[in-house]
Amino acid sequence: PVCSSSSSSSSSSTSSNNRVEETHTPAQRQAAARLALRKQLEKTLLRVSTLYSFFS
């Protein structure tokens, strides 16, 4: 449920930024996507690690 809500929010933000996206090169777009993915991964990893620390 958590990842589905985050994916829907990211898709809505990209659709609203279509006008801005056209000015970016594919490489810039890819870099921005990777950065966003990394930040999202770090958030989820932090959540998981805190959950594990609670249970251990």
Image (cartoon, helix red, strand yellow):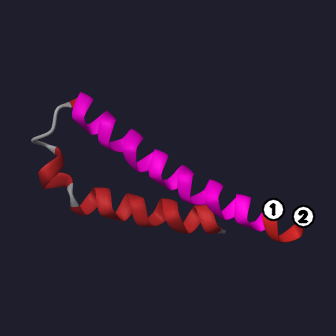
Residue at x-position 50% and y-position 55%: 40
For label 2, the residue is 56
Q: Residue furthest top?
A: 27
Residue at x-position 42% and y-position 66%: 9
Disc 1, disc 2: CB below 8 Å?
yes
Residue at x-position 80% and y-position 64%: 53
Q: 38 above or below 2?
A: above
Q: Is residue 34 magenta?
A: yes
Q: What SS does tag 1 mark?
A: helix
Q: Pick the quarter of the image with the N terminus.
A: bottom right
Q: Pick the quarter of the image with the C terminus.
A: bottom right
Characterize the local packing of mark 2: few (<14), some (14-19) or many (20 or more) Cα atoms within 10 angstroms. few
| Dominant secondary structure (helix, strand or loop) of the stretch shown in magenta | helix
Task: State the mark number for residue 52.
Answer: 1
Q: Is residue 31 magenta?
A: yes
Tell me the kind of residue under disc 2: Ser
Image side of residue 33 versus residue 45, left or right? left
For the magenta stretch, what is the residue range?
Answer: 27-52
Q: Position of residue 39 (x, y in %)?
A: 46, 52
**Quarter location, residue 17:** bottom left
In space, the residues marked 1 and 2 are separated at their CA atoms by 6 Å
Q: Residue furthest left?
A: 23
Q: Position of residue 4 (x, y in %)?
A: 58, 63
Residue at x-position 24% and y-position 30%: 26
Q: What SS does tag 2 mark?
A: loop
Characterize the local packing of mark 1: few (<14), some (14-19) or many (20 or more) Cα atoms within 10 angstroms. few
Q: Position of residue 8 (x, y in %)?
A: 47, 64
Q: Position of residue 20 (x, y in %)?
A: 13, 52
Q: For this rendering, which residue is in front, 47 or 33?
A: 47
Task: State the mark number for residue 1.
Answer: none
Tell me the kind of residue under disc 1: Tyr
**Quarter location, residue 2:** bottom right
